[in-house]
Amino acid sequence: MLAAHPLVRVFDALPGTRLEAYAVEWMRILGLAMLPVSVSIALVGPLQGAGATWTSLRVNIWTSLALQVPAAWLLGSCSTSAPLACG
């Protein structure tokens, strides 16, 4: 999230353009959205290693539905480029 501008410049987005603004915003949203993904990976990995694949599948599904989908909706609806931005 802190290095969004340098990362976007690697992909030839010119500074000050709308493309750069959208790309930087997307990188920041993606950075925040990766927090629930890391929790899911940390919970599912040991279960899969222990052979509890059905349990890990359930944890993965519920983590996605309870954390990732609401976070994506919230972050997407409150972004500055969204048609119905918050506030």
Image (cartoon, rainbow, N blue to C red):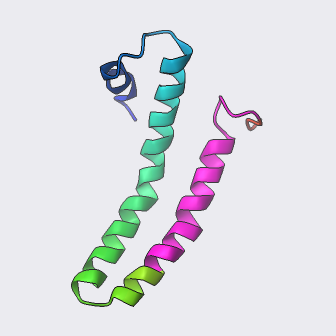
Q: Main secondary structure of the magenta part?
A: helix
Instruction: Residue at 40%, 68% (x, y): give it.
Output: 40
Instruction: Residue at 41%, 60% (x, y): give it.
Output: 37
Does the magenta segment cover residue 63?
yes
Specify the quadrant that holds the C terminus. Answer: top right
Picture quadrant of residue 71: bottom right
Instruction: Residue at 47%, 36% (x, y): give it.
Output: 28
Q: Is residue 17 left or right of residue 74?
A: left
* Residue nearer the viewer, 53 or 78: 53
Q: Is residue 72 left or right of residue 35?
A: right
Picture quadrant of residue 85: top right
How far across and how far down the image is residue 43, in percent?
Answer: 35, 75
Instruction: Residue at 33%, 26% (x, y): give it.
Output: 7
Does the magenta segment cover residue 69?
yes
Q: Is residue 85 left or right of residue 45?
A: right
Write down the region rendered in magenta: 59-83
How far across and how far down the image is residue 82, in percent?
Answer: 69, 34
Q: Residue furthest front?
A: 12
Q: Is residue 10 left or right of residue 20?
A: left
How far across and how far down the image is residue 45, in percent?
Answer: 28, 75
Residue 31 in the image: above or below residue 59: above
Specify the quadrant that holds the N terminus. Answer: top left
